[in-house]
């Protein structure tokens, strides 16, 4: 599994990373392991605005359903359309191409202060 160097995670198992001025948000591999086989993903509309900590979607598996929280505030600029049709793709690799939404954010600097680098997050959940 590929994990980017600049991924930051929160305690509710969402991640964010910046690439070319956009912020990609998804759920961590640990969250996917806990949920099991993903069968449904609900994502917001493009243009929706959220603050840090707000619920922006949900993921359902054969075991449970889970709300997804914003790790940073921002405006949705793109959703990962392929996950709507094929939610099971999240089980393959939640990072890399399996982000959930892309946002623009003027709050990243402030909102990311309490997020953890992936390696630190991984130590805490193991």
Image (cartoon, rainbow, N blue to C red):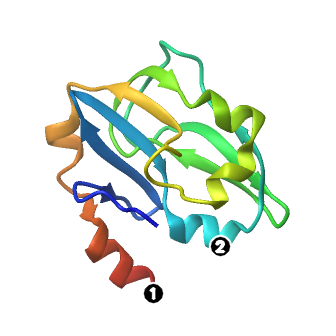
Q: Secondary structure at mark 2?
A: helix
Query: In the current view of this chain or complex, which residue is farthest to the top?
Result: 47
- Name the residue: 36% across, 62% down: 3
The disc, 2 or 1, on the residue closer to the chain's N-terminal end is 2
- Name the residue: 21% across, 27% down: 21
Residue 57 at x, y percent in the picture? 62, 37
Query: In the current view of this chain or complex, which residue is farthest to the right?
Result: 62
Residue 33 at x, y percent in the picture? 63, 72
Q: Residues within 10 Å of mark 2 (few under 14, many from 20)?
A: few
Quadrant hosting residue 23: top left
Up the image or down, 57 lies above or below 45; here it is below
Q: Which residue is mark 1?
A: 126
- Real-space CA distance between mark 2 and mark 1, rounded to the nearest whole angstrom: 12 Å
Residue 62 at x, y percent in the picture? 85, 62
Label of residue 47 in the image: none
Up the image or down, 116 lies above or below 44; here it is below
Q: Which residue is mark 2?
A: 34
Which quadrant, please, contains the C terminus? bottom left
- Name the residue: 50% across, 17% down: 48
In the foreground, 126 or 69: 126
Please indicate whether residue 55 sits to the left or right of residue 126 in the image: right
């Amino acid at each position: 599994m590929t994990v980017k160097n600049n991924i930051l995670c929160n305690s509710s198992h969402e991640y964010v990373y910046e690439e070319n001025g956009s912020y990609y948000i998804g759920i961590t591999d640990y969250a996917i392991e806990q949920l099991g086989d993903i069968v449904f993903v609900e994502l917001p509309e493009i243009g929706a605005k959220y603050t840090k900590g707000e619920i922006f979607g949900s993921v359902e598996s054969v075991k449970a359903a889970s709300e997804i929280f914003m790790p940073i505030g921002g405006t949705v600029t793109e959703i990962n359309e392929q996950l709507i049709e094929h939610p099971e793709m999240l089980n393959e690799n939640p990072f890399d191409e399996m982000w959930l939404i892309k946002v623009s954010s003027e709050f990243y600097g402030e909102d990311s202060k309490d997020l953890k680098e992936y390696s630190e997050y991984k130590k805490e959940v193991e």
